[in-house]
Amino acid sequence: RTGSGKTTLARLLLRLYDPTSGQISLGDCPTTAVELRSLRRRVGLVTQDVQLFAGTLRDNLTFFDASASDATLWQALTEIGIADWCRAMPDGLDTVIGANGYGMSAGEAQLLALARLFLADPGLIILDEASSRLDPATEKLVDRAIERLLQNRTGIIIAHRLATVQRADEILILDNGKVLEHGLRKNLAANPNSNFARLLHTGLEDVLA
């Protein structure tokens, strides 16, 4: 639910701020022991509010990294499923877009953000309600892109809707900033006394209603 601490957890992982007690580790290494630039190369984040700046598609994808070749960019766009859309733009990779993706749909902006992550190739990917504001057809495209992106990577999927977390191996339920439940998804789903099983049951009832 809103306010349970899901987005706060994502921000802590990226060290947008540090915990006031305890510590967060990636593997055996505390995040506070990792240089910020290095940490943010290893951890990628996509939220429902994609940040794009006024400039070319190329610059929005690479953050002005001149070492990224066109072949590398097209590979990322193809993997995410928006290469045809980009080729159809007036100047391809050199097409200028407005600040905050002005002139682009929410789905196009979200797919561009996922292509950015594919190029950055972080080991850990955080998806914070990444498809929550999309229409069903566009959400399917984004979900397909997420599936490709998560291959051979660790992903943290933050979501309100149960359908969004069905690809997860483990479930963590937060409530008021505290861990309410944690375990393998299949085990929690099979346990009628678990909070996750009750949420699944409630969700099914809502669908059937």
Image (cartoon, grey):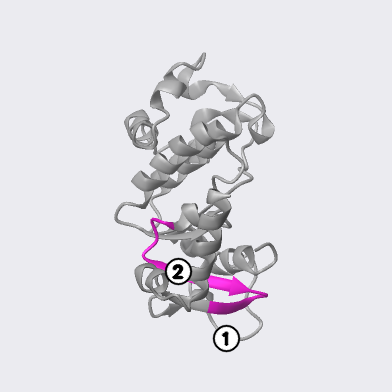
In the picture, measured across the screen, residue 107 lies left or right of residue 143, that is right
Residue found at the very far front of the displayed protein: 209
In the picture, measured across the screen, residue 149 lies left or right of residue 90, that is left
Q: Mark 2 highlights which residue?
A: 171
Task: Label 1, secondary structure: give it.
Answer: loop
Decide: few, some or many residues near mark 1? Use Cα within 10 Å; few <14, some 14-19, many ≥20: few
Task: Label 2, secondary structure: give it.
Answer: strand
Residue sitting nearer the eye, 170 or 193: 193
Relative vertical location of residue 125 with respect to residue 193 in this rendering, above or below: above
Q: Which residues are magenta?
A: 166-180
Residue found at the very far top of the displayed protein: 90
Distance, label 1 to label 2, CA atoms, is 21 Å
Q: Mark 1 highlights which residue?
A: 22
Considering the whole magenta stretch, tell me its main secondary structure.
strand
Residue 151 drawn at (x, y percent): 31, 52
Residue sitting nearer the eye, 3 or 91: 3
Relative vertical location of residue 36 with respect to residue 191 in this rendering, above or below: above
Q: Nearer the viewer, mark 1 or mark 2?
A: 2
Q: Residue at x 50, y 38 (%)?
A: 139
Q: Amino acid at mark 1?
A: Gly
Q: Amino acid at mark 2?
A: Ile
Q: Residue at x 38, y 56 (%)?
A: 167
Quarter occupied by residue 140: top left
User: In this rendering, does residue 65 appear at all?
Assistant: no
Q: Earlier in the sequence, mark 1 or mark 2?
A: 1
Residue 142 drawn at (x, y percent): 46, 39
